[in-house]
Amino acid sequence: MARGDMLFESVDIGGQVEILNRSPFEGVPMTIDFTSVSTTDPDSGEKVVRAGMPISAAGAEVKTTPWTGAVGILLHDVYESRPQGTILKKAYINETAAEANASVTYDDALYKLFPMIVFETGK
């Protein structure tokens, strides 16, 4: 028999944006650093780093070319209340969806930085 109240918190999060074109991928876990994040989710008001954003080894967003320090591409949106995410090392990415979701524009410098990621335009 349980003693005391069993408390829980329920958070509704909308559907995740899918940036992968194909299912096989390799990623590594990463704790995202929110100290310089300014993007907020319109529904919750919470800080968020969007899927498709290049991420540095320190877990910070890398928003512009030449993508200095970027080590992977964020797989799913990550919220400040739970800053754990996955960064892609090998994958087939839907470039159009990833760029739109992360509000960045990929270029040749990014393609060269991630030779094991295939950037495809659409499904």
Image (tube, rainbow, N blue to C red):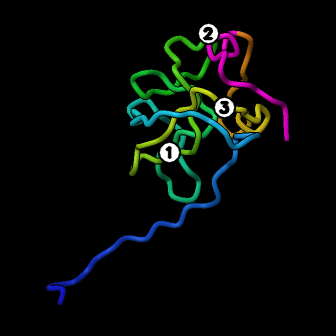
**Which residue is found at the position 73% from the left and 25% from the top?**
118
**Which residue is found at the position 62% from the left and 36% from the top?**
25
> Reading the chain from its start, which is encountered first: label 1 or label 2?
2
Q: Position of residue 82 (x, y in %)?
A: 40, 50
Residue 28: image tag: none
Q: Which residue is mark 1?
A: 78
Label 1 Cα crowd, 10 Å radius (few <14 / some 14-19 / many 20+): many
> Reading the chain from its start, which is encountered first: label 2 or label 3?
2
As displayed, is residue 35 above or below residue 2?
above
Q: Nearer the viewer, mark 1 or mark 3?
A: 3
**Which residue is found at the position 69% from the left and 43% from the top?**
23
Image quadrant in which the N terminus is located: bottom left
At label 3, the amino acid type is Ala
As displayed, is residue 80 above or below residue 122?
below
Q: Secondary structure at mark 1?
A: strand
Q: Position of residue 16 (x, y in %)?
A: 63, 53
Q: Position of residue 37 (x, y in %)?
A: 47, 34
Image quadrant in which the C terminus is located: top right
The stretch of residues the image draws in magenta is 109-123
For the residue pair 116 and 87, the one nearer the viewer reads as 116
Q: In the rendered structure, are the residues bearing label 1 and label 3 in contact, judged by CB atoms less than 8 Å apart? A: no
Residue 53 part of the magenta segment: no
At label 1, the amino acid type is Val
Q: Which residue is mark 2?
A: 66
The image quarter containing residue 30 is top left
At label 2, the amino acid type is Pro
Give me the C-alpha separation between circle 2 and circle 3: 21 Å
Give me the C-alpha separation between circle 1 and circle 2: 23 Å
Q: Which residue is mark 3?
A: 91
